[in-house]
Structure formats: structure tokens, C-alpha cells
């Protein structure tokens, strides 16, 4: 969750660290800090709050150095404060450490260090590691060995960078469970928790794997395992450009990413549709199709928005590919010893490809011999690297904490997987071709919805004072209801719940009065008439109703307070269209309330801790 950046080279590292931290701030934003070492001084500047606060303090100090590390924090142990912000230091203030992850045995390590006389300033688990490394340095080990020995005592997860006055020609970086990537420059090297912080400087990257430790000099680097075996790492070329991680004139990343959807969906589908054969072509699944079809069942696991996409995947795979599918939260899956074996296929959906629970679930499924398929956005991410096969969603970088374009691209890719499997089973050529024809129209249809942004804003603002919301949908629109409620909760802090519309009368109907907005997702599908009955039930209790309906629907319009119209599409692609007004509703309500849409309180983009 925290952002990490480090630099060693000939330039002044301060602007590089600050700019890198700004690009990583979506990962965590409750406090930030930098540590630099030069020939005359070792300096740490840290503060509670945003990187912009840190920036003022750092530039006021006028520090210059060609070696430094920076960190933006999402608190786990200890409240957000200057003391708890990273870097953490040894007592002599000559060793600086930044850390992403959780050191689970920090209390027992701390006790041992206290017996040796070490004093602690912060409430963090990270400070323990700084002192533990110092302990090994005092035993006359090199910095590399001291870090390695210390990490051998650590239980938990980490992505760390360490710099030390006594060996100021290097950064030591190590990874277990939290992402770290090296950026290889010309007489300068970088390290960061994701490539966003590097691509302004270099496109050449090296992904560290769990249990690896790197010694990074300005002109070369070496890598070993933490049990001291040398490893040779491959250098990859990143395709992403710097323009892809800017707001492009939009006030927020979230709005930009909502508006990006015609293009992001197009990119998810590009080169993957074979109209003549009515099938999709997914290079990442080549050779695995039969094994998937022969599976006893498919399990899909994920967290948050990706879990909602998984539910849509369940509906489409069962309906069209005729394979039994189960969906489970990754956080539950990983701990309940699920019954899975080599005859199962498990699909892991993750925008970031770094979500700790999803990654741990994948390790569990792999151990049990299941075929593991990753559906990720971030190229080269841990889940993408560790899966047996996979499909990238190619939505482009998603920076806003609230996931938007990743959701629609995840559904597009799940539809491609469904089409691939269904055509190998019973789906006819004309049916396959019909799905493809509809997929090709998605870009224009999404554009039509986005053109209604002003209307959606006007309607949304009428509901911005509400304290609770109910989102209801059936069939493919049930996961959309869940997603709409999640979007509203996370960025507007309004309590919202998503339900299958028919479940309302089993409890939530008690909440309905003239103060309760109810959002119905009521497209013309096989359950349309049933949803109309549910609308009537809310109307009878004077609930305020906003409905997402299909173009041409005049029936619902007469029954509800407001409607937003979306084009009709193939039923399994419906969520791609119906979710877009819900994303915009959440966005406009949050903006109206004056909230920080891109960095909502308590959240972080990529949840790399349990
Ligand atoms: O990167 P992932 O897709 O694995 O992330 C999963 C969730 O943390 C994520 O979808 C989260 O729920 C978003 N904030 C939702 O907008």
C-alpha cells in the first residue's frame, strides 16, 4: 500500500524522489518522508499528510544528494504521524529504511533489541527492522549481509530500501510479498514500488521476486536470494508512456478514467475477436482451453471491485460456457483450507496484480495443484507473473483509488474468456458472432452514456444530501448494484448497500421511507417485469427512485423520480454499460460534497497488506 522510491546516480535525487512520490501517492497518503545521504550529511525529512506538505519542507532545507529514498505511507502499525512516517533510522541516524508490508514478529524482535539497549521512537513495526540491521552492522557485517541476516529473522511481508552512511555507494532493496521494481538508467539506477515512479526516467526494469535482495549501485546492480544464492535477473522493457499516468486536463483521475472507457474497453478487446469463427483469441490461454473445459469447476477469487467483476463472470460462464463456477472473496479463500485440486481452475482477478489476499489465495491454489489463471491490468505484476496462464485486461494505468475502467475491462475480458470456452462447447457460430458484433459496438455505446455526463451530474447533485442509499438489480445487474454501492461508499462516505432486487422484501424494505434513495438498475432483460414489481414496492413506501433503464423504455420513466438511459446490448455485456452512470453518480456526489475523490480517507489503491 505504501509507495517506495529510491535513487542513486549523478543527479540531485530530491526532485526525483518528490516527483516519484507524487506518482505513487495513490498507494498511500497519510504521511511521507525522504532520507538522503551525501558526503557531508545524513538527512531525514518527514511529515504527516500529503507529499505536497513534504515537498515544501524538503525544498526549504535546500538539500542536495545523489543518493536518497522516499516513502508515502498508509498506516498499519501506529497512527499517521511524523514520528511514525518513514524512513526509520538507527540511533546514530546513519542508516535509513523505508518499508511496505507488515513485520508480524516485530514485538518479539523488539524485545530482543531492547535487551541489547536499543531505544524505539515510533509505534511502527518498521523501526524494529532498522535497529535489527544496525545490530548486524555492529557485528561488522557489510550492509548487504546485515540486511540479509536481519530479513532472515523477519516473519511477514516487506518491500524495503535501505541506505547507510558507511556504504553510501548503494541502495539495498529486498522483497517478500510487497512489490519492488528496479529501474535501470544510464549511470543512474532507481527502485520503486511500481513502475509509475520510474517511467519518466527509464523504461528498462527488473522485477524483484519474493525472497530476493538487490545491491544497487549507480552503474550496476547485483541480486541474490536472501539465503545468499546469486541470481541473474532479466531486464524488461515497459511500454507505458508518461501521458498515460497524467490527468490529461481532467480535475480528477477518477473522472479521466471514467471518460477513458470507450478507449480502455476497445483496448481490452483489440486483436482478440475473430468474427468469422465467432470466437475470441486469447494468447495467454493458448494450450489451456481444454484443461479449463475439463475442470470439475471454475473458481473465481478477488477482492472489492474485482470481486464484483468475478460475480458477473460467474453468471456469464455458467450461462454460456456451461461450466460450474463459484466465486469467493480471496481473503476468505486463503484461510479456510478450500477443497481444490488439480481438476479445478481458479481465476484470480486483480487490477493491480498485487493485492495481498488475492496473491495469497493464488499461492494456496497453486500448492493444491489447481490451474491458476490471472486476469490483471498491471503488466508484470506479481499475480500476472505467478499465474500459470492469464489474460491482461489492457485498461491502461488506473490511478484513482476507486476502480472504474478496470471493472469494465475485467468484464470485457471475462466475456472474451466465456466466448472462447462457450464456442468450444455448445455456443453456435451465429450466437458467437452476435456477441462479437455487440462487443464491437461497446465503444460507441459507452460514448453515448458519457455524453449524458451533465444530466447525470444534475440528477446526482439532487441526492448529495442523502445519508443512505440502496442499489438494486437482478441477474447481470445484481453485481452492478453492489459495485454502484461500493463506488458511492468509498468516495462520498455515504452508507450504501447493494442487493438483488428481490431480496429487498426480506429485510431492507424496512429502511424505505421518503428519505431513502433507491437506485434501480432495470434494463430490458428476462427479469425486467419482476424488477418493475420491485420498483412498485418501493414506490408504495414513498422511496425516492432513480432508475438506470434502456433507451426507449417509457414504462419505468413514469413510475420513478429520475431515469438515466443506456443503450441496449447483449445481456452478458450489460454491466459494462449500466455501471457507467453509477460511477458518474458517485463521482458527482463526492465532488459536490467537496471530498478528495482520488484519495478517499482511509483507503489506498493497492492493498498489499492483509
Ligand atoms: O487491485 P485489485 O483489483 O486486486 O484491488 C481489489 C480491491 O482492493 C479494489 O477493487 C478496491 O475495492 C477498489 N478501491 C474499489 O474501487
Image: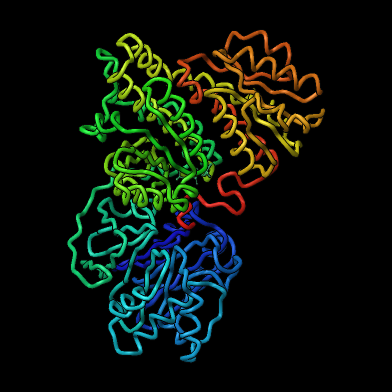
Is residue 198 visible in the rendered image? The answer is yes
Above or below, 472 against 92 in this view is: above
Residue 605 placed where, x, y %?
49, 49
Residue 543 horizontal side relative to residue 434, left or right: right
Instruction: Tell me where residue 319 sits by quadrant.
Output: top left
Residue 78 placed where, x, y %?
58, 69
Residue at point 29%, 85% (across, down): 141
Its colouring scheme is rainbow
Is residue 219 visible in the rendered image? The answer is no
Residue at point 32%, 90% (across, down): 139
Residue 313 placed where, x, y %?
43, 30
- Total marks shown come to 0
Residue 514 placed where, x, y %?
82, 28
Above or below, 226 against 408 in this view is: below
Q: Nearer the viewer, residue 434 or 109?
A: 109
Residue at point 81%, 29% (across, down): 513
Q: Nearer the viewer, residue 490 or 266?
A: 490
Instruction: Tell me where residue 287 sits by quadrant.
Output: top left
Amino acid at each position: 500500500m505504501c509507495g517506495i522510491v529510491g535513487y542513486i546516480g549523478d543527479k540531485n535525487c530530491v526532485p526525483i524522489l518528490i516527483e516519484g512520490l507524487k506518482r505513487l501517492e495513490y498507494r498511500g497518503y497519510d504521511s511521507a518522508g525522504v532520507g538522503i545521504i551525501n558526503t557531508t550529511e545524513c538527512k531525514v525529512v518527514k511529515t504527516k499528510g500529503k507529499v505536497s506538505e513534504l515537498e515544501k519542507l524538503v525544498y526549504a532545507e535546500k538539500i542536495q544528494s545523489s543518493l536518497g529514498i522516499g516513502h508515502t505511507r498508509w498506516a498499519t502499525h501506529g497512527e499517521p504521524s511524523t514520528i511514525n512516517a518513514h524512513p526509520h533510522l538507527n540511533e546514530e541516524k546513519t542508516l535509513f529504511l523505508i518499508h511496505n508490508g507488515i513485520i508480524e514478529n516485530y514485538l518479539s524482535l523488539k524485545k530482543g533489541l531492547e535487551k541489547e539497549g536499543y531505544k524505539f521512537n515510533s509505534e511502527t513495526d518498521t523501526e524494529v527492522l532498522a535497529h535489527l540491521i544496525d545490530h548486524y552492522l555492529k557485528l561488522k557485517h557489510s550492509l548487504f549481509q546485515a540486511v540479509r541476516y536481519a530479513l532472515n529473522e523477519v516473519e511477514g511481508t516487506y518491500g524495503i530500501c535501505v541506505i547507510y552512511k558507511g556504504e553510501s555507494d548503494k541502495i539495498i532493496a529486498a522483497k517478500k510479498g510487497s512489490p519492488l521494481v528496479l529501474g535501470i538508467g544510464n549511470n543512474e539506477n532507481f527502485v520503486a514500488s511500481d513502475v509509475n515512479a520510474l517511467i519518466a526516467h527509464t523504461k528498462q526494469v527488473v522485477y524483484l521476486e519474493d525472497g530476493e535482495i538487490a545491491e544497487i549501485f549507480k552503474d550496476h546492480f547485483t541480486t541474490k536470494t536472501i539465503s545468499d544464492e546469486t541470481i541473474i535477473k532479466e531486464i524488461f522493457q515497459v511500454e507505458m508512456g508518461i501521458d498515460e499516468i497524467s490527468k490529461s486536463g481532467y480535475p480528477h483521475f477518477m473522472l479521466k478514467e471514467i471518460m477513458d472507457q470507450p478507449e480502455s474497453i476497445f483496448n481490452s478487446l483489440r486483436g482478440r475477436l475473430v468474427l468469422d469463427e465467432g470466437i475470441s483469441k486469447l494468447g495467454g490461454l493458448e494450450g489451456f482451453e481444454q484443461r479449463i473445459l475439463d475442470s470439475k469447476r471454475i473458481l473465481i477469487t478477488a477482492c472489492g471491485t474485482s470481486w464484483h467483476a468475478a460475480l458477473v463472470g460467474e453468471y456469464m460462464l455458467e450461462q454460456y460456457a456451461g461450466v460450474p463456477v463459484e466465486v469467493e472473496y480471496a481473503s476468505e479463500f486463503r484461510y479456510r483450507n478450500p477443497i481444490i485440486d488439480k481438476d479445478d481452475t481458479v481465476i484470480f482477478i486483480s487490477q493491480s496484480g498485487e493485492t495481498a489476499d488475492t496473491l495469497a489465495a493464488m499461492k494456496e491454489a497453486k500448492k493444491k495443484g489447481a490451474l491458476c489463471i490471472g486476469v490483471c491490468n498491471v503488466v508484470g505484476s506479481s499475480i500476472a507473473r505467478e499465474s500459470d496462464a492469464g489474460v491482461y485486461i489492457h485498461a491502461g494505468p488506473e490511478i484513482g483509488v476507486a476502480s472504474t475502467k478496470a471493472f469494465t475491462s475485467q468484464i470485457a475480458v471475462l466475456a472474451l474468456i466465456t466466448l472462447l470456452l462457450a464456442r468450444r462447447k455448445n455456443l453456435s457460430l451465429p450466437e458467437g458472432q452476435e456477441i462479437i458484433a455487440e462487443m464491437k459496438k461497446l465503444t460507441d455505446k459507452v460514448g453515448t452514456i458519457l455524453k449524458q455526463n451533465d444530466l447525470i451530474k444534475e440528477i446526482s447533485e439532487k441526492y448529495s444530501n442523502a445519508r443512505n442509499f440502496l442499489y438494486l438489480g437482478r441477474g447481470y445487474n445484481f453485481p452492478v448494484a453492489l459495485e454502484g454501492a461500493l463506488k458511492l461508499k468509498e468516495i462520498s462516505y455515504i452508507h450504501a448497500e447493494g442487493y438483488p432486487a428481490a431480496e429487498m422484501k426480506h429485510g431492507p424494505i424496512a429502511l424505505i421511507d421518503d428519505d431513502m434513495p433507491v437506485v434501480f438498475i432495470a434494463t430490458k432483460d428476462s427479469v425486467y417485469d419482476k424488477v418493475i414489481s420491485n420498483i412498485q414496492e418501493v414506490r408504495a413506501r414513498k422511496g425516492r427512485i432513480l432508475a438506470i433503464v434502456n433507451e426507449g423504455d417509457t414504462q419505468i420513466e413514469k413510475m420513478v423520480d429520475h431515469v438515466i438511459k443506456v443503450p441496449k446490448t447483449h445481456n452478458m455485456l450489460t454491466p459494462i454499460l449500466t455501471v457507467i452512470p453509477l460511477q458518474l453518480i458517485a463521482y458527482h456526489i463526492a465532488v459536490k460534497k467537496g471530498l478528495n475523490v482520488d484519495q478517499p480517507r482511509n483507503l489506498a489503491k493497492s492493498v498489499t497488506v492483509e
